[in-house]
Image: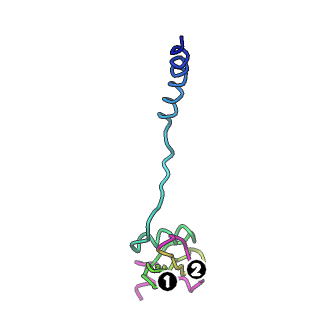
Amino acid sequence: MRLLLPALCLLIALPSVAAVAKAPKSPRVRLQGTVKNAKDAKTISERETGGIAVSARQVPLNGASGGWEVDVHMPKEDRGWRCTVDSDTRQVHTKDRIPNPPLKGTRASQR
């Protein structure tokens, strides 16, 4: 009799535990670590500004790992952005307005 009550509780709880274990997990992409290459820096600056990243170069920043300076072309605007992406935090450190840089592969950039 003393073992019947705990066993009964276990049988009742078992289906709910199995349902939680089978629940689909949300596909969350977590970006971790430092910005290691120009492609990562361009992606971050494009997401922040909504433009098209044209070029990226490494620059010294206040941290030990430095950062990336990315020029972003803004379609349908006369000015673009120059973003500085911090390598440690993966965030845009500064944004400055610049003359719109030409896109690579267009006639304007081949002159």
Vertical relation: 84 (above or below) 90: below
Number of residues whose C-alpha sits closer than 10 Å to that of mark 2, classed few (under 14), some (14–19) or many (20 or more): few
**Marks 1 and 2 close (CB-CB < 8 Å):** no
Residue lying at 58% horizontally and 79% vertically, measured from the top left:
95
- Amino acid bearing label 2: Thr
Query: In the image, residue 31 lies at what x, y percent?
Result: 47, 61
Q: Amino acid at mark 1?
A: Leu
Instruction: Give whichever of 27, 100 is nearer the camera.
Output: 27
Task: Report how far apart the C-alphas of labels 1 and 2 lie in the structure.
Answer: 11 Å
Label disc, if present, on residue 23 of the rendered structure: none
Q: Secondary structure at mark 1?
A: loop
* Mark toward the viewer: 1 or 2: 1
| Residue 22 coordinates in the image, percent (x, y) | 47, 33
Q: Which residue is mark 1?
A: 61
**76 horizontally vs 90: left or right:** right
* Name of the residue lying farthest toward the bottom: 111
Q: Can you give x and y, in whole percent of width and height, for residue 11 in the image?
A: 51, 20
Query: Where is 14 relative to 64, above or below?
Result: above
Q: Which residues are magenta?
A: 88-111
Give SS at disc 2.
strand
Q: Which residue is mark 2?
A: 94
Residue closer to the observer: 6 or 109: 6
**Residue drawn at 52 percent across, 13 percent down:** 4
